[in-house]
Image: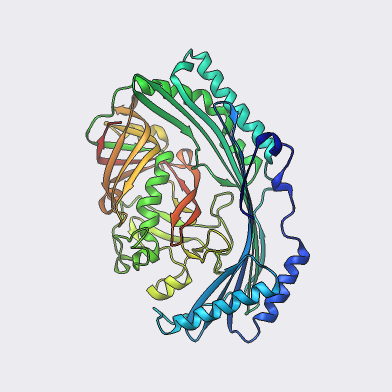
Amino acid sequence: MGIILVHPEAASRLNYLKLPMRDRASTDAIEKSFERLAQGIDHCVLRLVEKRRLGVSVRLDVPEPVLNDHVSGCMLTVVEDGGAGYAATGDLSEGGLELALKDARDRAKLTASHRLFDAARLPIPADRARVDNRSAGGLPGVTDCLAMTSDASRRIKAAATNAKAMDKIADWSAAIEVAECHSLLLSSAGARIEQSYGYVSPGLSVVARDHGQSQQRSHGDGHMARQGGLEQLDVVDFAEHGERLVGEALALLRAPECPTENTDVLLMPGQMILQLHESVGHPLELDRILGDERNYAGGSFVTPEMIGSYQYGAECLNVVFDPRVPNELASYAYDDDGTRAERHDLIKDGILVGAIGSASSSLRAGIPAAASGRASSWNRPPIDRMANINLLPGDHDLGALLASVERGVLMDTNRSWSIDHLRNKFQFGCEIGWLIEDGERKGLIRNPGYRGVSANFWRSLDRVGDRSTEAVLGTLDCGKGEPNQLMQVGHSTPACVFRNVQVFGGG
């Protein structure tokens, strides 16, 4: 079953996420079939995945078609004679599994003579665990999501009406995406790892237009996804930001352009999430470092020899890979290879000390694994992916960060990005900015942007905000791999001050 778009009036009478997932009897049957089929195979893994996803949005006070996505299937992976092969199937009968297993074994034989490394050295998972990260309060269904998005949309319209500016508000929307996922990993070594989680991803957007100038302000909008349920919408104050967004979008129409100069920059978490993602997370993925992604997603300016000695940033830069943080979007106990998840230092006191590698990439590179073999669905193989990549807080509150800047620009909420194939040279634009003069936030500026080079930009980091400036964020659509895989990634980051940055304006 794939994606279905349903008229809101019909969808409101249903509650898709309350429908039962795969029943116990059918799961037991799959387990028994795997046990029989895997006999005589030393290294065989089955990964069963079932996911339901619901998307509800209201635009210009009009409900849009409801997205209901239900996927289910499994992938079988085999290692034989030093080669590795995999095959996926949506036919979960014993006959369907048998055909997929034969395909995987044939592929393993084909790769044995063309291998980059001896796959027989790969660890085979053997743990037995059951992990349920779903919210006790459950996920909202269609009716709840429609009510919340409609209410948020009405608040935006009311704010524009009260400001006597409806003629200048060209577009607005409110959306919520929720999902629930179950996975079961079995191995010929006796592993049985069952994991469940749910997430919510809210978003608000307002576009103002006047005299040929357009400005957008958003809240969430794809970067505020978190594991959990209804309670997470309260944490991010989903419906409370409409009036602020309307006011800021209108004010940006009248604001002056961001100046073009070399100056200090204070980046808020809404922008830091992308800075961290693009210029730390992606360059440290081992498959990029090894060259596997060069034809599609790109490589990395980082080389294996840099790990352990390279000065990636200032001494106040500390970044960790941590899939065990409660409620962060990419939290899990085991990755999709069955490797147990643990926290790993990536950058410590500015020095590059680790990388993001799955079991296979880590074996090839001789670098310890970080439980980062992740697959976007049942019909995709695990590849090296970020999980929760978090920049650890420092000691400065927002007032202290501002006070440290004699002249500069505060920027928030990404609106555009560009970075080269090695994740080194970059240019980012933000939705909103404020001038900083003598340690105080001054007037709004529009179309703020900045550029730099990863290899020295992080060395210009001078102040790291404390926990009061921190935000736990996440994105649902990090793309990578051939065929493409859109993956959920979490980022926790405080506000940060960078010195002598190239800042520019322009729509």
Please say if 30 is above or below 275.
Answer: below
Number of numbered discs overlaid on the protein picture: 0
- Can residue 394 be seen? no
Could you say where residue 380 lies in the image, as x and y percent from the top left? 52, 64
- Residue 407 placement, left or right of 97: left
Could you say where residue 123 lies in the image, as x and y percent from the top left? 52, 77
> Quadrant of the image for the C terminus?
top left
Please say if 50 is above or below 446.
Answer: below
Q: Quadrant of residue 91?
A: bottom right
Please say if 240 is above or below 457.
Answer: above
> Residue at horizontal 43%, vertical 71%?
362
Could you say where residue 59 lies in the image, as x and y percent from the top left? 55, 30
> Residue at horizontal 68%, vertical 36%?
144
Q: Residue most toward the right? A: 25
> Residue at horizontal 29%, vertical 23%?
256
Could you say where residue 112 lies in the image, as x and y percent from the top left? 45, 83
Colour logic? rainbow
